[in-house]
Image (tube, rainbow, N blue to C red):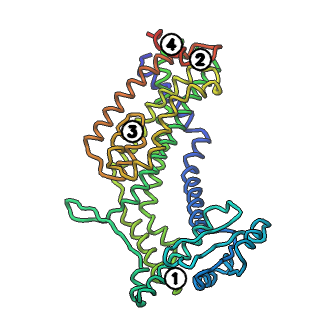
Amino acid sequence: MKTKSKIGTIIKHEYLSKIKSKGFIIGTILAPVAIIVIYGIIILVAVMSADQTTKKLAIVDYTERIGAMLVERDTSKFFLTDLTEAELNEKVLSGEIDGYLVMPKDFAEKGAATVYTSGGGGLGFVTLIERNTKDIIVNLRLDEIGADASVKALVNRGISLSTMKVTQEGTKDDYSQVFAIMGYVMGFVIYGLMFTYGAFVMRGVIEEKANRIVEVLASSVKPFEIMMGKVIGIGAVGLTQVLFWIVLMGVFVAFGGSIAAGFMGTPDMATAGAEMQEQNAMIEMLNNISISPWLIVAFLFYFLAGYFIYSTLFAAVGSAVDQESDAAQLQIPVTLPIIIPIMFIANVMSNPDGTLAVVLSLIPFFTPILMIARIAATSVPIWQIALSVVLLAATFFACLYFAAKIYRVGILMYGKKPTFKDMVKWFKLAK
């Protein structure tokens, strides 16, 4: 049997055995739904609890006016007191009150106050106080300089910043923040997929080695062909799953505006106005966003490039051990380069055109995660993309060369728990 047909047979076996499994079907269909639901709940809870607290604070008001305004806003969280600070300290220590807020006479001028509690309580009550006192202080300062109602309204109006993209065809709406978030998501998805499918490859190699199946295969197929067949077959499974998710995302983008409009409904008279404007802006944004096909092509390329680099290394680790528990130590040099770019992704996204972002995204082991995040968030120069492709190709062949030599010896070694020194020795011994 020719080499190509042998690898093709192994690829077909790996692909069909994985893609027909219940785990693949459930994971492919339910995973995106579960992720959307989980992140939706997390965001909803974060927004709803941003300034929530169960604590109720006494207010010692030396300004003789701001405390009353604060209590009037939320009597469930604040109440005025005439007790001294020493008496309040005793009540805090005995647990009779959660704490107290001291507003000095110059609070309106300097904006500095102090909260006393028994400790803990989180950031919720601090945020609650800041949010409720900020506009009170601002309006008092405006009163002191004789500002009228129109000036107050002007100061409190806030700002609305929109961004536009300049193109050869003219200016267009620029959804930089949306695409920056999309870059985050794409980077994290590639991170998760490289870990997941890399682990699949390693686990599959270990199982075949433990069951002695690999010895049967090795009698008719070269170890390199076994490794490549497994890596390509599982990679094809991952690609199938990603393509399905891309189709789902396309449906969401195409009908996102209509779906959002359906959920939001029509605001009543009490909420009309600013809220309706926000809803319309969101629906318009969902309707107008268009994802470049090149972004999807880039995502698929960097996913596959990252997968093939790391899966060959995971295969080498799997070939070296007899059971999965023995692979923990040997996995560290493979998993660290996957984790490190995730630690830098926030810095990269804050300035995707900066020197740090460019340098990190061109390091081949970091490229799959960081380059796709940059491509989604900004216009990456062609030479940087081309250089990343060349470096990824060179790194893949280097990893393949290294992993194939380890795999060739390790897959037939049993008994002793291997060390890094043993793997270097196998690398030198392999022809």
**Residue assigned mark 3:** 367
Report the quarter where the N terminus lies: top left
Mark 3 and mark 1 in contact (Cβ < 8 Å)? no
**Which circle marks residue 271 in the picture?**
1
The crowd level at tag 4 (other Cα within 10 Å; few <14, some 14-19, many 20+) is some
Residue 416 spot, x, y in % from top left: 64, 14
Q: How far is disc 2 from disc 4 in space, using C-alphas? A: 10 Å
Q: Residue at 71% across / 63% down in the picture?
A: 118
Query: What's the residue type where badge 3 is placed?
Result: Thr
Q: CA distance from mark 2 to mark 1?
A: 67 Å
Please indicate, yes or no, whether residue 153 appears anywhere in the rendered image: yes
Question: In the image, is residue 233 above or below residue 219?
Answer: below
Amino acid at dot 4: Trp
Of residue 77 and residue 430, the one placed in the foreground of this image is 77
At 41% across and 40% down in the image, what residue appears?
Answer: 368
* Residue 429 x/y as whole percent: 47, 9
Q: Is residue 1 above or below residue 171?
A: above
* In the rendered image, the vertical position of residue 30 relative to residue 147, given as above or below: above
**Mark 2: amino acid:** Pro
Q: Is residue 224 left or right of residue 120?
A: left
- Measured Cα–Cα span from mark 4 to mark 3: 29 Å
Q: Residues within 10 Å of mark 1 (few under 14, many from 20)?
A: few
The residue positioned 59% from the left and 53% from the top of the image is: 34
Which residue does the numbered mark 2 point to in the structure image?
418
Q: Earlier in the sequence, mark 4 or mark 3?
A: 3
